[in-house]
Amino acid sequence: MELLLADAEKAHGHLCAGQILGVRMAMLGCARLGIEEPRGRDRKRLVCFIEIDRCATDAIGVVTGCRVGKRALKLRDWGKMAATFVDLADGRALRIVATETSKQKARELYPEIENKNQQQMRAYREMPDADLFLEEWVAVRIDAKEFPGYKGERVACSQCGEGISYERWVERDGQRLCMGCAEPEARYYQPLASGDDVGRGDASAVGAQPAAVPVLVPRCECP
Ligand SMILES: [Zn+2]
Ligand SMILES: [Zn+2]
């Protein structure tokens, strides 16, 4: 575990309670599925669904070797400290959730450590799995086009012309539209260009950049 924690620290930039929870959650998932070398011999067996985008997410990626870019790590942004480990070899899937009582237990174990993060880091290394996690075997249906090695058709959006992979298009009136054109209101971004002379694909015509907005956020929200 110490080696994995060192890897997690390197990948994430620091070691924190969330990292330790993530490392232990992933170790437990692999152990229950009988996956001994997730980053070696067994590297094509595992797909992880992770329900939170925080420190633990990186740690689970480090331990399992599952990466977003390999399509083996699926983020479901539900804000829950939970993940499901799917063994593609036999279809078994285990969902693991961090218990809500783990923080309280850490307090009881090390009341003398004032810093919450230090207290939890210490306790989460030592607490038994049963105090940290709840486990349940679940069924996960992974569509063929969601598999890591899926090779699909690539089409151009009928409206903006940008390429779309993995069938992430919407059919409307016989046209294939990208998500952005199909539902402009739901876009995570809105174009800033206002003038008529701003053309696509012409770098010199890209509108003036807006003034940078300072965003003050902590790098890590761990307690
Ligand atoms: Zn962290
Ligand atoms: Zn489009």
Image (cartoon, helix red, strand yellow):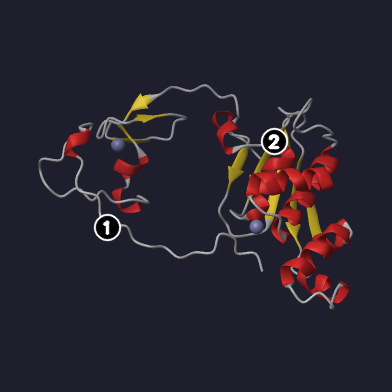
Q: Residue at x 73, y 39 (%)?
A: 64
Q: Residue at x 27, y 57 (%)?
A: 211
Residue 74's x, y, as percent? 59, 42
Of residues 108 and 171, the one drawn nearer to the viewer in this rendering: 108
- Identify the image quadrant of residue 98: bottom right
Is 190 situated left or right of 82 in this image? left
Q: Is residue 26 visible?
A: no
Q: Residue at x 19, y 45 (%)?
A: 207
Is 77 situated left or right of 194 in this image? right
Q: Is residue 103 visible?
A: yes
Residue 179's x, y, as percent? 36, 41
Could you tell me the amino acid type at mark 2?
Gly
Counting residues from the start of the chain, the first of labels 2 and 1 encountered is 2
Circle 1: element type? loop
Point out the frontmost of discs 2 and 1. 1
Could you tell me the amino acid type at mark 1?
Ala
Q: Residue furthest left?
A: 196
User: Which residue is identified by label 2?
Assistant: 65
Please tell me how crowded label 1 is: few (under 14), some (14-19), or many (20+) other residues with Cα within 10 Å: few
Which disc is residue 211 wearing?
1
- Whole-Å distance between the Cαs marked 2 and 1? 39 Å
Is 176 situated left or right of 71 in this image? left
Of residues 138 and 218, the one drawn nearer to the viewer in this rendering: 218
